[in-house]
Image (cartoon, rainbow, N blue to C red):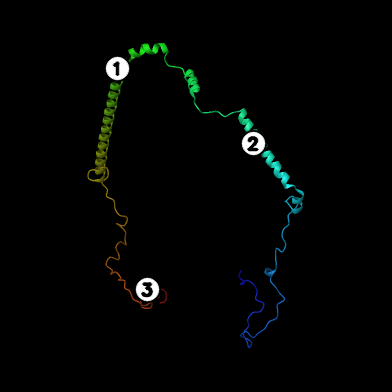
Amino acid sequence: MTTAARPTWAPAKGGEEQGGVRTFGPSQRYSSRDLASHTKLKPRKEGQDTQDELKRRNLREELDERERKYAVGKDNEGEDKRKHPPLLLDVGPGRRDVEEKLVPKREDADDSDVDSADSDGSDDDDDEDEAAELLAELERIKKERAEEKARKERLAIEEEIRTRESELVRGNPLLNPTNFSVKRRWDDDVVFKNQARGEPKATKRFINDTIRNDFHRKFLNKYIK
């Protein structure tokens, strides 16, 4: 820790005794930072496992009691599992038979064999007709979308042509009979316009002297003379 902030009780003074010959007696003053602090340990209070409390307790009996409670809890847990076994997800042959009995069939067992031969040919014809109808509907939708796209493009081109023609008409004053006035500048008819047109422009030059340069001379003419 630094001692820069501590007071100097014997400051150095110049004189005949300078050079380390001076002697000082022991100082009777001391700083508060030099005092000893925390000279005692904080003792434990009642209820914080003091030495007397630990001597009075029987730790062996407490450990045996905890182990006995843990063993009883494990036995109760096993008994609960035996009384209420968990649901098994295994699907055995008996489970499959039960599921097949519970699931209703769409057709009767007697009618399935008789109707299967009759319905094979008609189902194929119906599938072909439905596929042909779907293809025709798809072609019709594609054709309608292509026509709609071409119509929108044609309308956009016509709108762009009309906008361009209207802009050309408004931009030419000879083709727009409603407005023949030409815009004028705000300083066309002022009195003092272009007064300094014939005056020569002052050329800037660089002089590496703070007294003879143009800025210093201008400053003197403005504020000193």
- Identify the mark at residue 215; answer none if there is no mark: 3
The residue carrying mark 2 is: 74
Q: Residue at x 38, y 75 (%)?
A: 216
Q: Is residue 122 above or below residue 153?
A: above
- Identify the mark at residue 125; answer none if there is no mark: 1
Q: Residue furthest left?
A: 174
Q: Secondary structure at mark 3?
A: helix
- What is the x, y in percent for residue 113? 37, 12
Badge 2 or badge 3: first in the primary sequence: 2
- What is the x, y in percent for residue 105? 44, 17
- What is the x, y in percent for residue 215? 37, 73
**Pointer 2 local density, CA inside 10 Å: few below 14, some 14–19, many at least 20:** few
Quadrant location of the N terminus?
A: bottom right
Q: Residue at x 39, y 13 (%)?
A: 112
Mark 2 or 3, which is nearer the eye?
2
Tell whether 69 sits left or right of 177.
right
**Pointer 3 local density, CA inside 10 Å: few below 14, some 14–19, many at least 20:** few
Mark 2 or 1, which is nearer the eye?
2
Q: Residue at x 48, y 20 (%)?
A: 97
Q: Nearer the viewer, residue 73 or 18?
A: 73
